[in-house]
Image: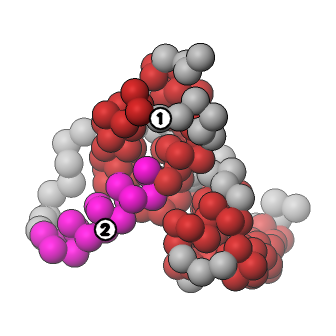
Amino acid sequence: MKQPFENAIDAHGPTVLRVCRAVLGATVDADDAWSETFVAALRAWPELPEHTNVEAWLVRVAHRKAIDVVRANRRHAVPTDELPATAPSTEGVPHDGDPDLWSAVAALPERQRLAVAYHYVGGLTHGDTAELIGGTADAVRRAAADGIRALRKTYASSATQEGKR
């Protein structure tokens, strides 16, 4: 029996938000992508087969919504001198635990960042990640490994310089 949709939000909402924020940064765009993910998921929920890996499915929907946000931002750039009056939520912000680590993740090349985000943050397999970002599972595995190696190199050196280790 399929679980109620509300339970899926409770169980996988933080993961989906971390993925959105890993892809889009800790911005309102990530919060919008998270919301649009669950609106789309709610529409598709009655037709979803019972054997579906809900978390992986939601991460895929979030990926597509994040791409929609990136495309929309490219088309409708609106410069402003003022910041929004309300602060974005702090739930699922990847910068909370270790801002240096998340800065290092943000600095990775796009393919490595996406491979690391979807595999290590979102919990997708390399094959599922390859379906999202293109290429083969082996290529995604290589990109994730290169990303982790780069993180170990840059993050470890910044942590050593700051005396964190």
Q: Main secondary structure of the magenta part?
A: helix
Q: Is residue 149 left or right of residue 11?
A: right
Magenta run includes residue 11: no
Residue positioned 68% across, 51% down in the render: 123
Mark nearer the viewer, 2 or 1? 1
Residue 77 locus on image (x, y percent)? 15, 72
- Type of residue at label 2? Val
Say above or below: 54 vs 93: above
Contact? badges 2 and 1 (CB < 8 Å): no
In depth, the one of 81 and 154 nearer the eye is 154
Q: Is residue 21 left or right of residue 107?
A: left
Q: Is residue 160 visible?
A: yes
Cα gap from disc 2 to disc 1, whole angstroms? 27 Å
| Residue identified by numbered label 1 | 48
The secondary structure type at the circle numbered 2 is helix
**What mark, if any, has residue 70 been given in the picture?**
2
Q: Is residue 121 visible?
A: no
Query: Range of the magenta residues?
Result: 61-77
Residue positioned 50% across, 54% down in the render: 60
Q: Earlier in the sequence, mark 2 or mark 1?
A: 1
Q: Is residue 109 left or right of residue 162?
A: left
